[in-house]
């Protein structure tokens, strides 16, 4: 990514928060890299080099600033939406995809060659995949040191380091002090780790963030026992990962420009993967300013973006779960799908003693594949489709999560058509250009705005919205909510 160094320096001198997360400044005299909002004295122009990502700065030999904490910057890049492979690769790395596997194995999961993957990462991030994984580990560990009271051995495990010795060595080389000394040097460290083994972390985003729309979308689809939204607007749900069960809660901190995630899970080693999934669920990596500028050129979407400038696309905790939700929602209302899902969770999900109202985790694919769902209150064809989804998830575990544009493989699952495939791509794969043009609600919203009704007409109109059609769909759905209609997805 090319940066205008003079423009970046002006933003650095002004400590302009609008650039936070868009680039980082490396000071050659100190070999430290900072966020644009760093409170330290502004360095001389000739001593500063600008990088498009923290990964690129660290790969160039700069170490993170202890004052502005680069790990606290919003995690996004201007390239997002232009390289789906890199976006998917980052998601897999964020969930530990390189902690126990090679770059070649990561490339295979992404459906590309190793050399091509390295080239794409250098082109868009300025660093190879291994450097990205290393930076992720270091910055996540730095966040845990600052924001929790977890023991250092647990932090090393949670961040993906193979051993405490390796963890200490990396921190000593990068920060020129040990992890323990770094924690002791903090004047007023956060103490967000409590006796109930729950960890609370800040997850920053690029402003604005339309939390009301996000939590409203999730609340309308919340399955009893699995998830809920409380009176304060906080989202809670149960989770399952590698056979272990737990829960998390999400609160919005508008003043701090972040979400606060409270996570209760028995395996500390899973913490980084859980945080990565939460980021995807709440779409924290997107830059709404980039999408807003693109949609401002369109007469239909301009006013919708002005009404909801921070609107995001709700993701999914798990791709298999989202596929089941998509099947349940075929040709029925949101409320109907939610009620069916609640009965499904209580019948087939493992019991869990979580926060108030959380009693079960979502059923595993094997349980779904073997279950007889004919008396659950749905057509027999849909019950058979749910079983087929379970079988498909067992046969190809990454089908509903990693994607790779393999819509044809999704459509090959009995009962999954184009609408459901696009819905899975939008929310589970995080494909920013997925667009379920056959959705009745989308067509209705577009018709209100003057587009001729019909999937073909809407699909043709959507060409101008690439590569952000998923966000166009979110705005159209939200516009129906604004006029009191029901979104039937």
Image: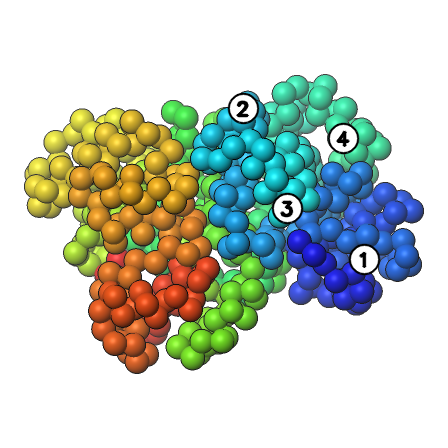
Q: CA distance from mark 3 to mark 4?
A: 27 Å
Label 1 belongs to which residue?
39
Q: Secondary structure at mark 2?
A: loop
Answer few, some or many: residues within 10 Å of disc 3's Cα (few below 14, many 20 plus, some between 14 and 19): some
Label 4 belongs to which residue?
171
Which of the pair 153/173 is nearer the observer? 173
Q: Secondary structure at mark 4?
A: helix
Q: Earlier in the sequence, mark 1 or mark 2?
A: 1
Q: Residue 241, how many percent across, how many down?
A: 41, 30
Q: Secondary structure at mark 1?
A: loop
Q: Is residue 334 left or right of residue 92?
A: left
Q: CA distance from mark 3 to mark 1?
A: 31 Å
Q: Earlier in the sequence, mark 3 or mark 4?
A: 3
Q: Residue at x 57, y 28 (%)?
A: 103
Q: Earlier in the sequence, mark 1 or mark 4?
A: 1
Residue 98, relative to residue 297: is it above or below?
above
Q: Residue 46, how many percent across, how many down?
A: 90, 57
**Residue 123 numbered tag:** 3
Q: Earlier in the sequence, mark 2 or mark 3?
A: 2
Q: Residue 52, how many percent across, how many down?
A: 69, 52
Q: Is residue 334 left or right of residue 307?
A: left
Badge nearest the viewer, 2 or 3: 3
Q: Is residue 99 left or right of residue 418?
A: right
Label 2 belongs to which residue?
101
Q: Residue 272, how many percent across, how many down?
A: 55, 35
Q: Secondary structure at mark 3?
A: helix
Badge nearest the viewer, 1 or 2: 2
Q: CA distance from mark 2 to mark 3?
A: 22 Å
């Amino acid at each position: 990514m090319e940066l205008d160094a003079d423009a970046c320096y002006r933003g650095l001198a002004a400590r302009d928060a609008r650039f936070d997360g868009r680039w980082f400044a490396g000071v050659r005299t100190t070999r430290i890299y900072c966020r644009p909002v760093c409170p330290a004295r502004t360095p001389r122009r000739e001593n500063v080099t600008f990088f498009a990502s923290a990964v690129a700065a660290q790969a160039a030999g700069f170490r993170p600033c202890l004052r502005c904490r680069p790990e606290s910057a919003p995690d996004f890049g201007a390239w997002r939406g232009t390289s789906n492979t890199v976006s998917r690769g980052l998601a897999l790395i964020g969930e530990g995809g390189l902690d126990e596997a090679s770059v070649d194995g990561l490339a295979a999961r992404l459906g590309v060659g190793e050399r091509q993957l390295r080239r794409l990462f250098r082109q868009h991030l300025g660093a190879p995949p291994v450097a990205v994984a290393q930076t992720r580990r270091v910055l996540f560990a730095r966040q845990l040191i600052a924001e929790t009271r977890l023991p250092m051995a647990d932090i090393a495990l949670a961040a993906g380091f193979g051993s405490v010795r390796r963890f200490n060595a990396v921190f000593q080389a990068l920060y020129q002090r040990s992890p323990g000394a770094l924690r002791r040097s903090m004047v007023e460290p956060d103490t967000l780790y409590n006796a109930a083994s729950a960890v609370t972390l800040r997850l920053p985003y690029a402003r604005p963030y339309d939390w009301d729309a996000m939590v409203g979308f999730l609340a309308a689809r919340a399955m009893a026992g699995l998830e809920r939204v409380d009176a304060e607007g906080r989202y809670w749900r149960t989770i399952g990962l590698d056979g272990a069960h737990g829960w998390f809660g999400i609160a919005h901190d508008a003043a701090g420009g972040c979400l606060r995630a409270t996570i209760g899970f028995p395996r500390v080693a899973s913490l980084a993967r859980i945080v990565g999934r939460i980021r995807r669920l709440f779409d924290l990596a997107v830059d709404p300013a980039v999408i807003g500028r693109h949609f401002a050129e369109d007469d239909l979407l301009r006013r919708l973006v002005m009404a909801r400038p921070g609107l995001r696309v709700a993701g999914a905790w798990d791709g298999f779960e989202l596929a089941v939700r998509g099947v349940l929602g075929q040709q029925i209302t949101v409320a109907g799908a939610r009620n069916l899902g609640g009965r499904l969770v209580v019948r087939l999900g493992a019991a869990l003693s979580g926060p108030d109202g959380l009693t079960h985790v979502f059923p595993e694919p094997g349980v779904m594949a073997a279950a007889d769902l004919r008396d659950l209150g749905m057509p027999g064809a849909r019950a058979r489709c749910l079983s087929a989804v379970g079988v498909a998830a067992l046969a190809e575990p990454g089908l509903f999560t990693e994607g790779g544009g393999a819509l044809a493989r999704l459509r090959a699952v009995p009962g999954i058509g184009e609408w459901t495939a696009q819905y899975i791509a939008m929310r589970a794969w995080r494909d920013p250009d997925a667009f379920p043009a056959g959705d009745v609600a989308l067509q209705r919203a577009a018709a209100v705005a003057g587009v001729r009704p019909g999937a073909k007409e809407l699909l043709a109109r959507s060409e101008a919205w690439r590569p952000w059609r998923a966000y166009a769909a979110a705005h159209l759905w939200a516009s129906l909510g604004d006029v009191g209609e029901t979104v039937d997805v």
